[in-house]
Image (tube, grey):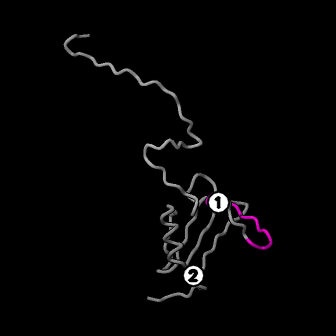
Amino acid sequence: MTRYTLEEQETILRYDRASDDLHVYTASPPEAAKWKRLGYPLKELSPHSWVAIVPKACLRPLRRLVGGQVPKRRATGRGFIRGQTQAVQPGSEQQSPRAPALDIPERKRTTIDPSEGV
């Protein structure tokens, strides 16, 4: 089996303003595997090249450069940050700041006696 150098394992994304299609080509097996997982309709041209035509919306927007570098994204959501996580002990009084404690009275449970009839 022929092994290609990293330079030969190119990936090309082509689109134009006249069409809503994005033409993708790769000679990189890991890139082809990723596209297959994403559901792209890959067609194998040879043992080491794949093509697909997908909607142009699959292409993510371009990122801004700051000083010639791509800036790191700020953390969003409620994910874990190394060194800033704390274990919450079961039964502790700590509550999430987004979920305030509600004072809801406990409901009375009623049972239906099948011998009484409806």
Q: Is residue 58 inside the magenta stretch? A: yes
**Residue under the point 57% across and 36% down:** 100
SS of the residue at dot 1? Answer: helix
**Residue under the point 43% across and 43% down:** 91
Q: Residues within 10 Å of mark 1 (few under 14, many from 20)?
A: some
At label 2, the amino acid type is: Gln
Q: Is residue 64 left or right of residue 10?
A: right
Position in image of residue 18 (x %, y %): 72, 60
Q: Is residue 27 inside the magenta stretch? A: no
**Residue under the point 49% across and 74% down:** 44
Position in image of residue 89 (x %, y %): 45, 49
- Tell me the mark number nearer the camera, choosing from 2 and 1: 2
Residue receiving disc 1: 56
- Residue 9's tag is 2
Q: Is residue 89 left or right of residue 62?
A: left
Query: How far is the residue under mark 2 from the one under mark 1?
Result: 23 Å
Q: Is residue 116 left or right of residue 4?
A: left
Q: Residues within 10 Å of mark 2 (few under 14, many from 20)?
A: some
At label 1, the amino acid type is: Lys
Q: Nearer the viewer, residue 50 or 107?
A: 107
Q: Which residues are magenta?
A: 57-69
Q: Main secondary structure of the magenta part?
A: loop
Furthest residue in direction front, as rendered: 92
Q: Is residue 118 above or below residue 13?
A: above
Q: Is residue 98 left or right of residue 30?
A: right
